[in-house]
Image: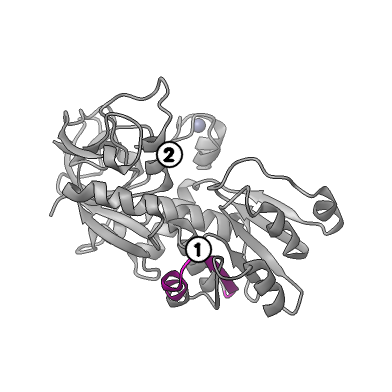
Amino acid sequence: MKAAVFYNCGDASQIQIAEVPEPQVGPGQALIRVHASAFNHLELWALHGPADESYRFPMWTGSDIAGVIEQLAPDVSGWSVGEAVVVNPSLSCGKCARCLEGEISQCDDYDILGSAGNGGNAEYIAASADKLMRMPEGFDFVSAAAAPLAYQTAWRAIVRRANVQSGEDVLVLGASGGVAAAAIQFCKMRGARVFAVTSSEEKLEKARQIGADFALNRKTSNPFEEVRRLTQGRGVDLVVENVGASTWGESQKILRKGGRIVTYGRTTGRQATTNLSLLFWNEQTHIGSTMGSLSDFRQAMEMVLNGSITPVIDSVYPLEQAREAYARYERGEQFGKIVLNICR
Ligand SMILES: [Zn+2]
C-alpha cells in the first residue's frame, strides 16, 4: 500500500510517498481502507523528532481516520465489511479501573493510535473494532476524519472539565488550531461570549465565521490588553490554553477572581511559571485536559455526525501531495484541520 512516510526526522521535505507493507489484522481488529486522514500536532512532533528507540523507519503517522471496513478479525462481531466508520484513536489497556469506567484517557497505558508510527496517513490501517463508530449514510469522509481527536479533546476541555456556562466570557488562545477552533464552536453552543486570538487578518475572519464574538490579532496588538479593554477591565471567566510557556503568565493575569484556565497543550514549551499569589488569592482553578473518555468521544462525534457542529477544515490534499500538506502545517498557515483525501 501507499503511505506518506519519512525515513529521517526533519522538516516537510522528508515526506515522500512510498510502498509499505499492508497492516495485518490482529485479534479484535478491523482493517480499514482509509478514505481520509487528518493532521494533528502529533504529525509534526513525530516528523521533527529527535528519533528515539521507538522509531521504526520508514515511519508514517496519522491518528484521525475515516474509512470503510475491508476485513474483520474472526473474533469480531457486530460489524460488517463495507461499513463506513470513523476511528477513536485512543488506545488503553481496557482492563484497569479507569478503563472500566470509560475514563480511558486516564489509563496508565494511554496512547494515541498512529502517533508513533503505522498511522492513518496510508491506504490501510488496522484498528480495534471496539473503537469504531458508524458514519451516517452519505456522510463526508473528510469531515468525519477532521473530528475525532480535535472534537473529543475540545468537548472534554470545554464541556466536561471547564464546564463552560451560558453568559461566561472565554478567551481562546491559538485559535487557528484544530482543537481551539472546535473549542470556539462548543463555547458558542454553550452560550458563552468568545474572544479568539490568532495571527492574521484572514484567520481573524475565519474565527468570526465560526462564532467568535471578538477576534484579536496577536501580531498587531497585545490581545490581553484588548480583552481587558473590551471587558472594562474585568477580564474573563475562562482561558482556553494550548500555547503554554509564552502565554501562561498573561493567562493567569487576565482571569477574573474565581476564574479558571483549561489547558490541553503547550505549543511554545512545557515549562511555565505559575504566580501562586494569583492562584490562591484570586481563587483560580487550573485544569488539565487530555483527549477524552469513551463518552466524550461519542458525544462529540454525535454532534458532528448529526450535523449540529460542522468541523472546521482548512484544506484537503490528495495523499500524493502529503509533503505540501505537511509544509502548510509547518508554516502555521492553517485555520482548522488539514486533511489528506486518500481513497478518491
Ligand atoms: Zn486502562
Amino acid type at image mark 2: Trp
Q: Judge by depth and name the residue closer to the eye, 177 or 75.
A: 177
Q: Which mark is residue 175?
A: 1
- Is the residue marked by circle 2 packed among few (<14), some (14-19), or many (20+) residues within 10 Å? some
On screen, 288 above or below 240? above
Amino acid type at image mark 1: Ala
Which image quadrant is residue 30 in? Answer: top left
Q: At numbered mark 1, what does the secondary structure look like: helix, strand or loop?
A: loop
Residue 316, percent from left and from top: 25, 59
User: Magenta stretch containing residue 284, yes or no?
Assistant: no
Image side of residue 220 versus residue 247, left or right: left
Query: On the image, numbered disc 2 is attached to which residue?
Result: 45
On screen, 87 above or below 213? above
Residue 83 appears in the rendering? no
User: Magenta stretch containing residue 205, yes or no?
Assistant: yes
Q: At numbered mark 2, what does the secondary structure look like: helix, strand or loop?
A: helix
Query: Residue at (76%, 73%) from the top-left corner?
Result: 234
In which quadrant will I find the N terminus? Answer: top left
Query: Residue at (41%, 55%) from the top-left corner?
Result: 332
* Cα separation between marks 1 and 2: 19 Å
Segment colored magenta: 191-206
Query: Residue at (66%, 50%) from the top-left corner?
Result: 287
Residue 193, percent from left and from top: 60, 75
